[in-house]
Image: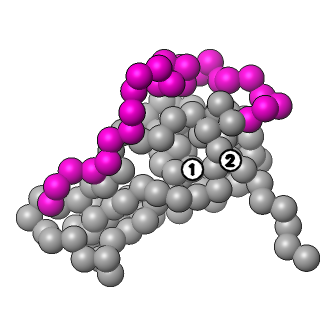
């Protein structure tokens, strides 16, 4: 019997979900797919300066899980940058903060700001 799915808590979806070289036509075989929770770990630890422990607490998972997700995200980001591949952020095992009934909305990311009149934009043209 499979283990039950463990949802990772994510505050907001990225405003832009596709990144890559301007002069390259998109080839599905040359795309790298980063999950939303991988994006969240990069945002929390690299941009906001949180520790793995703090990030794990916000996402509702173990520190070892965050470490694995973060390492996967950095590997994908490096592959995209070094090899000129398109990076797409989509999918994963996550729920937005507002979907967790047993948790109050987090204060650290100010996700309540993003629920009022701010829509997700999807990538630019190549």
User: Is residue 66 left or right of 115 when viewed as pictured?
Assistant: right
Secondary structure type for disc 2? strand
* Position of 43 relative to 91 (above/below): above
Q: Residue furthest right?
A: 1
* Position of 125 relative to 16 (above/below): below
Asked whether the viewer can see residue 1, the reply is: yes
Instruction: Identify the residue under disc 2.
Output: 8
Mark 1 is surrounded, within 10 Å at the Cα level, by few (under 14), some (14 to 19) or many (20 or more) other residues, namely many
Secondary structure type for disc 1? helix
The overriding secondary structure of the stretch rendered in magenta is loop
Q: Residue at x 8, y 64 (%)?
A: 23
**Rendering coords of residue 30 (x, y %):** 30, 77
Q: Residue at x 13, y 69 (%)?
A: 24
**Rendering coords of residue 27 (x, y %):** 25, 77
Q: Quadrant of the C terminus?
A: bottom left
Q: Residue furthest front?
A: 117
Of the image marks 2 and 1, the number of the one nearer the N terminus: 2
Q: Is residue 102 magenta?
A: yes
**Residue span colored magenta:** 100-126
Colour mode of the rendering: one colour
Q: Residue at x 64, y 49 (%)?
A: 94
**Rendering coords of residue 85 (x, y %):** 27, 68
User: Is residue 83 left or right of 70 when viewed as pictured?
Assistant: left
Q: Quadrant of the N terminus?
A: bottom right
CB within 8 Å, label 2 to label 1: yes
Q: Quadrant of residue 33?
A: bottom left
Q: Which mark is residue 60?
A: none
User: In this view of the protein, which residue sits in the foreground, 62 or 32?
Assistant: 32
Instruction: Identify the residue under disc 1.
Output: 37
**Rendering coords of residue 99 (x, y %):** 69, 36
């Amino acid at each position: 019997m499979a283990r039950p799915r463990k949802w990772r808590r994510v505050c907001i979806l990225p405003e832009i979900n596709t990144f890559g070289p301007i002069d390259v036509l998109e080839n599905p075989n040359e795309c790298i797919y980063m999950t939303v929770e991988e994006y969240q770990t990069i945002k929390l630890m690299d941009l906001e300066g949180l520790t793995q422990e703090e990030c794990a607490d916000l996402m509702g998972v173990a520190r070892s899980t965050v470490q694995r997700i973060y390492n996967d995200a950095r590997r994908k980001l490096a592959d995209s940058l070094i090899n000129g591949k398109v990076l797409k952020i989509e999918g994963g095992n996550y729920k937005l903060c507002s979907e967790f009934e047993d948790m109050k909305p987090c204060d650290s990311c100010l996700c309540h700001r993003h629920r009022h009149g701010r829509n997700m934009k999807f990538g630019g043209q190549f």
